[in-house]
Structures are given as structure tokens and as C-alpha cells.
Image: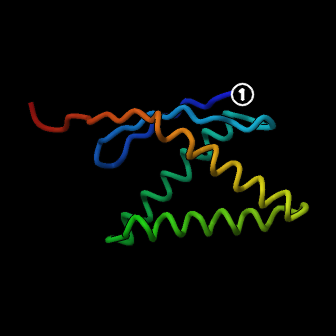
Amino acid sequence: MNHLPYRYQSPTGDAISFDFPLHDQTGSATRVHQLLDRILHVLNHEVGLLGDTQNGDLLQALAMALAVRTELIPADPELTHRLARDLTNQALSALPEARHERVQVGHA
């Protein structure tokens, strides 16, 4: 199984490194990386504009967005639903090995 190394730096400066497993039929790891970057960028921008947003509300909206995108795929619903669940579980399986870094922010 191929993996996608991914490092995310939050707006607060904290960084997390992941080694996400990729689905066997991934078309382009580069495109997956680019989409993930853009999704997180837009998400951070929108949360900044909206202000106080609870983490549970954010996760719920992301889950619903996945459901919407899954339903838009013109294929057998049983197949697409299973694929969405499998991909979600696969991504979450990378969490125990995620490496957290505290980036020191301050003045010299």
C-alpha cells in the first residue's frame, strides 16, 4: 500500500505530520495532496471569517460534505457509500502515528 506523507501547520503554528495510507486505486497522490491543501486552506479561512466555531460543528459539517460528495458520484450507491466509509477509516487509521510539533513563536 502506498502512503502520502503530509505535514500540516495550523494557523497557531502547531504542526502535525501524517503518513496517510492511500487507496490501491488512487489516481494521483499529487492531486490528493493538492486537494487536501486547498480544502484545509479554505476551511481555515472560513472558520476565521465565521469566528467562534466548535470543533464538533466543524467535524459534522465535514462529514456532511463527504456525504454530499459521495451521493453526487454517478455509480452504485452501495459501492460509493462503502468507498466513503473505507477511505474515512483508512485516513483515521493514520492518527495514532501522527507526530505533533510545537513551533516556537516569539521574539528574539
Q: Quadrant of the N terminus?
A: top right
Where residue 9 sits: x, y (%)? Answer: 38, 40
Q: Nearer the viewer, residue 8 or 49?
A: 8
The image's colour scheme reads: rainbow
The spot of residue 70 in percent (x, y) is 75, 62
Secondary structure under tag 1 reads loop
Single out the residue that lies furthest toward the left: 108
Residue 29 percent coordinates (x, y): 69, 34
- For disc 1, the neighbor class at 10 Å (few under 14, some 14 to 19, many from 20) is few
Instruction: Tell me the quarter of the image containing the C terminus.
Output: top left
Q: Residue at x 68, y 39 (%)?
A: 31
Residue at image position (85%, 57%) is: 79
Left or right: residue 59 versus residue 78 is left
Can you give x and y, in whole percent of width and height, for residue 33 in the image? 61, 38
Q: Is residue 41 left or right of residue 86?
A: left
| Amino acid tagged 1 | Met
Does residue 55 appear left or right of residue 4 in this picture?
A: left
Residue 67 to residue 13: above or below: below
Residue 103 to residue 39: above or below: above
| Residue sitting at x 40%, y 37% | 16
Count of numbered badges drawn on the protein: 1
| Residue 24 lies in quadrant | top right
Q: Residue at x 55, y 29 (%)?
A: 5
State the image quarter where residue 52 is shown: bottom left
Quadrant assignment, res 63:
bottom right
Location of residue 25 with respect to 89 vertically, above or below? above
- The residue beneath circle 1 is 1
Q: Is 12 on the left-hand or right-hand side of 42?
A: left
